[in-house]
Amino acid sequence: MTQASREFDPDKTVPVADPNAPARFAPQGGEAPPPPPSVAETEEQIQAAAKSNETNLDTLIGRLVVETGLATPEEVQHCLEMVQGTIEPAVQRSLAHALVANEFVTKRQIARLKQILEAERSGQTIPGYKLLGKLGAGAMATVFKAKQLSLDRTVAIKILPKKFGQNPQFVERFYAEGRAAAQLNHPNIVQAYDVGKAGEYHFFVMEYVEGRTVYDDIVKHKRFPEREAVDIAIQCAEALQHAHERGLIHRDIKPKNVMINREGVVKVADLGLARAISDKEAAEAEQGKAFGTPYYISPEQIRGEVNVGPPTDIYSLGATLYHMVTGSVPFDGKNPSSVMHKHLKSELVPPDQVNPKLSSGVAEVIEMMMAKSASKRYQTCRDLLIDLKAVRDGHSPPLAHKDAFDAQALASVVEAEAAAPAQQALDREAELKRDRKRHMVRDPLFIALVVTLAVSLLFNVILFVARLG
């Protein structure tokens, strides 16, 4: 914990120097040190220092509260007077206590202000931007809400921790995310604005999405209604189609990377693992290594295959959709290795078996999205969207509706088999007729009869002509 956070925490006592510690003496021949202060004098000094620290802290808090719009200057002044005992005997130890006691701010908001102070005092400031609070932190970076001063707009800034800033591999991956995001411009993808370095910190500025993640909703509600989940999947698929058509695969689609803003628009975030499909050099460098999140990773990512394409993202989106509609991850285990082993070897429990309320259509789509073999999945998001939109509209998915296809094929086979004997009888009868005709033409009696009829006809014609003469 930094010095700023220790000072800010109103509920934590500050350690003080031991007044009974032995006095230090100057070396022999040196000037004698002044006598140590009395206990009373020491307590006065401590109180004065504490009061000075509180005053400085109150000034910082008062400035942040007003700048972030949590309270008006008049409300802050009123609380300061309470702390100083101007309007009544001082009962609050700090401005933070007074603001909370008067319900001008909440403890949660005070905690966010503390994070801003931590960032400012640790040097995490970006020229041209003003930090407004911490949005979240992961193993690789911390994300702050900020204001871009030049355009007066709210943004999100991802900052790489100083401990990773000295590692070329981490820095390169951090900038690669910015470059990947900059290539994409789609309403369902978090937009990239800027990337750079300020002091010892590398930063990535992006669109601020005010809302929640799919993971937040799963935690809160356990599962999504089918239609809502399908609609979210459609927007994700449209975002991925845009990325794939520009030669990028995301490689880390999961509930925490799918955001929903207040208007219900889905935003695919975190391109930290994105890679160009054509980047063979990077693919070969990563060969044999698993990149992704175990609960949603595709089998080919687990194997570290070189040729990884759009079906990889489709698998992860399928695992995400599975989690959304069932409330459970597709495969679970004691550790990441066991989970990934199940992605490779275990049969998927049909989603409509986990949640019987699901339609057969959405279950069929998910099962095709999560086929073990990439060749048996949807090959493009364009194909996937055909089925997702059909399911959303209450129809059977034309590409994944195996049961209907098999039933139609079976009916055709049965009908053909039933019709076969009758058709064969007709064919035999026609052949017999043709044979009879051929035999009649070749029979001598038949030939003699034809000749006799021809001679008789010719004789009758001659008689008729003679009579006319």
Image (spheres, rainbow, N blue to C red):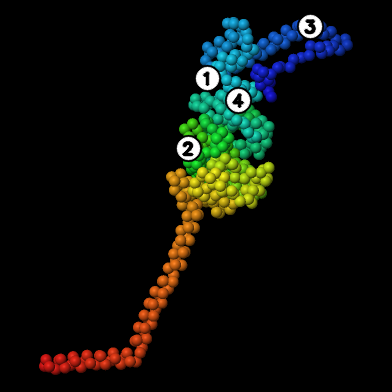
Give the mark nearer the N terminus: 1 vs 2. 1
Near-viewer residue (418 or 442) = 418
Instruction: Find the distance from the CA under tag 3 to the CA under tag 1.
Output: 46 Å
According to the picture, the residue beneath numbered tag 4 turns out to be 125
| Residue found farthest to the left | 469
User: If you read the primary sequence from the N terminus, does the residue marked by circle 4 or circle 1 appear first?
Assistant: 1
Find numbered disc 2 in the image and state the secondary structure of the residue it sits on.
Answer: loop
Answer with mark 2 or mark 4, whichever residue precedes in sequence.
4
> Compared with residue 102, is residue 138 higher up or lower down, i.e. above or below?
below
Across and down, in percent, residue 200 comes to 65, 29
Residues under numbered marks 1 and 2 in contact, where contact means CB atoms less than 8 Å apart: no
Q: Amino acid at mark 3?
A: Ser
216 vs 309: above or below: above
Q: Mark on residue 38?
A: 3
Q: Neighbour class for label 1 at 10 Å: few (<14), some, many (≥20)?
A: few
User: Does residue 243 appear anywhere in the picture?
Assistant: no
Q: Where residue 28 sits in the image (x, y, percent)?
A: 88, 11
Residue position for label 2: 187
Position of residue 122 in the picture relative to residue 22 (left or right) = left
Between the C-alphas of marks 3 and 4, the distance is 43 Å
Residue that appears at 58% across and 25% down = 133
Numbered circles on residues, count? 4
Whole-angstrom CA distance, mark 1 to mark 2, is 29 Å
How crowded is the residue under tag 2: few (<14 C-alpha within 10 Å), some, or many (20+)?
some
Judging by the rendered image, the residue that carries numbered circle 1 is 69
Q: Position of residue 97 (x, y in %)?
A: 61, 15
Of labels 3 and 2, earlier in sequence is 3
Could you tell me the amino acid type at mark 1?
Answer: Gly
